[in-house]
Image (cartoon, rainbow, N blue to C red):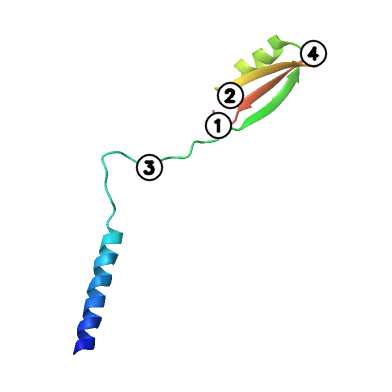
Amino acid sequence: MLAAAATGAALLMGAASATAQAAPATSGTSTTSVAPIADSWIHVGTYRTLQACYGDGVNSAYSEWDCKGPFSSKWQLWVNDGS
């Protein structure tokens, strides 16, 4: 009978701790964070002039683009694949 009481107490303690662990803690502020989406910049082409690079950037299907340079008197068009 003593063994049965000890087993019953152990089961109750186990159930109580399992219930406490399963219950989520709530708070007034959100602690959920979302990982930022990484930008993926793609090199589209190399141009002799900034105007040519700019023209292709404006006419591209992407909302974010950039003409970088000059590198060796050339301009490079980069677009953000996520835009």
**Disc 2 from disc 3: Cα separation:** 34 Å
Which mark identifies residue 32?
Answer: 3
x and y, in percent, of residue 9 in the image: 22, 77
Q: Name which of mark 1 and mark 4 comes first in the sequence.
A: 4
Q: Amino acid at mark 4?
A: Ser
Which mark identifies residue 73?
Answer: 4
Q: Pick out the residue farthest to the bottom.
A: 1
The residue located at (55%, 31%) in the rendering is 82
Vertical placement of residue 74 versus 17, above or below: above
| Residue placed under numbered mark 1 in the picture | 82
The residue located at (63%, 18%) in the rendering is 57
x and y, in percent, of residue 5 in the image: 19, 83
Residue 20 or residue 45, whichever sits in front: 20
| Residue placed under numbered mark 2 in the picture | 61
Residue 16 or residue 57, whichever sits in front: 16
Residue 73 or residue 57, whichever sits in front: 73
x and y, in percent, of residue 67 in the image: 66, 17
For the residues labelled 1 and 2, say whether their Cβ atoms are less than 8 Å apart: no
**Disc 2 from disc 4: Cα separation:** 26 Å
Q: Name which of mark 2 and mark 3 comes first in the sequence.
A: 3
The residue located at (28%, 71%) in the rendering is 14
Horizontal side of 17 relative to 61 (left or right) equals left
Q: Quadrant of the C terminus?
A: top right
Q: Name which of mark 2 and mark 4 comes first in the sequence.
A: 2
Q: Amino acid at mark 2?
A: Ala
Of tags 4 and 3, the one toward the viewer is: 3
Q: Pick out the residue farthest to the right.
A: 72
x and y, in percent, of residue 19 in the image: 26, 63
The residue located at (60%, 33%) in the rendering is 40
